[in-house]
Amino acid sequence: MSNPRLKFQSQCEASLFEAKKAHSVGLETCSLLGARTALIRMQRQQECKGIDDLVAKGVITPFLARQANEVRLWGNVTAHEDVPPEHPESADVEQLLGFLDLLFDTVYVQPARLEALKAKRSQVGGGSA
């Protein structure tokens, strides 16, 4: 039986990959919409109503939450407002995608690395603690 959590995680990663691909060819609005989708999918996977819930759960820092909220807000602006064609700028999108990289690293990658090292330690007789 497949793990729905892994399915959501891969959907989050796929959305982030698409956002980066759009950015790589200068499709900044598409990139931000993809980034917003990745963020929403991550929130669903983490079973939280908003980014600040991740702070309350101790998953991310308040500063990382502010960065993630900036991605969300830029995504909302590009989705719902008449944004001038020169915005968003490529450098801004690059920074916002970097924020998502940090978020995904904190939520997915670092916990998995920690668990893998803990498992190795227990296999070599390192005990628990």
Image (tube, rainbow, N blue to C red):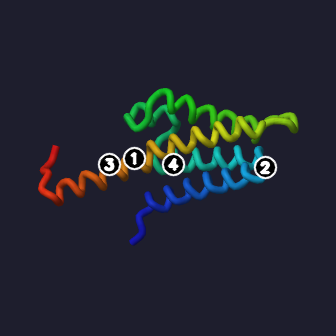
Q: Percent position (x, y) of residue 110?
A: 40, 46
Q: In this view, does 96 lie above or below 104?
A: above
Asked if residue 122 can be seen in this view, the reply is yes
Please give the residue where the numbered disc 4 appears in the rendered image: 44
Q: What residue type is labelled 3?
A: Leu
Q: Helix, strand, or loop for circle 2?
A: loop
The quarter of the image holding the C terminus is top left
Q: Residue at x 47, y 45 (%)?
A: 105
- Mark 3–mark 2 Cα distance, whole angstroms, equals 36 Å
Q: Are marks 1 and 2 in contact (CB under 8 Å)?
A: no
Asked if residue 76 can be seen in this view, the reply is no
- Mark 1–mark 4 Cα distance, whole angstroms, equals 19 Å
Please give the residue where the numbered disc 2 appears in the rendered image: 27
Q: Which amino acid does label 1 sit on?
A: Gln
Mark 2 or mark 4, earlier in chain: 2
Camera-side residue: 129 or 78?
A: 129
Q: Do the residues labelled 3 and 1 touch (CB within 8 Å)?
A: yes
Q: Helix, strand, or loop for circle 1?
A: helix
Q: Which amino acid does label 2 sit on?
A: Leu
- Mark 1–mark 2 Cα distance, whole angstroms, equals 30 Å
| Picture quadrant where residue 68 is located | top right
Mark 3 or mark 2, earlier in chain: 2
